[in-house]
Amino acid sequence: MNPIQVRPEWQPAPEVINLVETDVHLWVITLEQPEAVVKHLVTFLADEERERMARYVFPHLRQEYAVARGAMRSILAWYLGLEAKALQFAYGAQGKPRLAAGDVKFNLSHSGGLALLGVTRNREIGVDIELVRPVNELSQMAKRNFSAAENVILSQLPAEKQTEGFFNCWTRKEAYIKALGDGFSYPLYRFDVTLKPGEAARLLRVADDPAEASRWHLEAVKPAEDYIAAVIVEGRDWTLRQWQWDGKRIVA
């Protein structure tokens, strides 16, 4: 497999990072790492994380899980000034993880060899990343998950743009429900997002709550070619900063 080339706007992080409430930090993590790095990251994992890792049948999926969770722990430990394996997590009713103490919030997603980690202070955040790939029965899948308005827009796109439109819609919706912490218990068809290629990412409408869309700001990001990703954060008075985790900076 050829190494994934992260886009140049995702720079290696500086030696010192100050996370303030008006910042949103996004980290792209390459999940293919040298064996020594993977083994080191595995030592950060809690027992329940190791048990979950062991459930993956294929070795490359076990490695991707270990790197995503280990790198996440390493990055969060850097912000908090703690040891990575000392981090304690709590989980919401739908399984969304959070730090057991403190005001740092985060969300993690991974797909096709890349992970995306969003970190904020005192703001709910959701992220989603997807490797763009052919979708079997795309229109049927969209009808099951997207709103009526979104399905109309998707169907009107040129055939060569529909896969991109589908993943624009999917990542933006996933990011929102992850920010809510509701998982798939919140129906994807109950809210609308933009999806046309080239159109700015926006949360347009949430059913039965006219004010909800204005509470969030949604952005599309592109970590690498052939990937589509989205981040959504409470409020609009924040600045996005994009970093690349390269496996060299590991907090023990």
Image: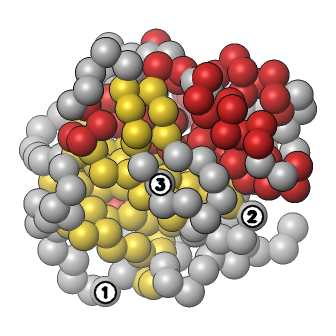
| Nearer to the camera, 250 or 137 | 137
Render colour scheme: secondary structure
Mark 1 Cα shell of 10 Å, populated few (<14), some (14-19), many (≥20): few
Quadrant in the rendering for residue 143? top right
Q: How many marks?
A: 3
Asked whether, in this view, residue 69 is left or right of residue 135, the answer is: left
Q: Is residue 252 above or below residue 169?
A: below
In terms of sequence position, does the residue under pointer 2 or pointer 3 come before the other?
3
Element at label 1: loop
Q: Is residue 242 above or below residue 204?
A: below
- The label shown at residue 71 is none
Give the amino acid type for the residue marked by disc 2 in the picture. Asp
Q: Is residue 45 above or below residue 100?
A: below
| Residue at 87 percent of width and 67 percent of height | 1
| Residue at 44 percent of width and 84 percent of height | 12
In terms of sequence position, does the residue under pointer 3 or pointer 1 come before the other?
1
| Nearer to the camera, 48 or 210 | 210
Give the amino acid type for the residue marked by disc 3 in the picture. Ala
User: Which tag is nearer the camera, tag 3 or tag 1?
Assistant: 3
| Nearer to the camera, 104 or 42 | 104
Q: Name the residue under label 3.
A: 201
| Residue at 84 percent of width and 74 percent of height | 2
Q: Name the residue under label 1.
A: 14
Asked whether, in this view, residue 80 is left or right of residue 144, the answer is: left
In terms of sequence position, does the residue under pointer 2 or pointer 1 come before the other?
1
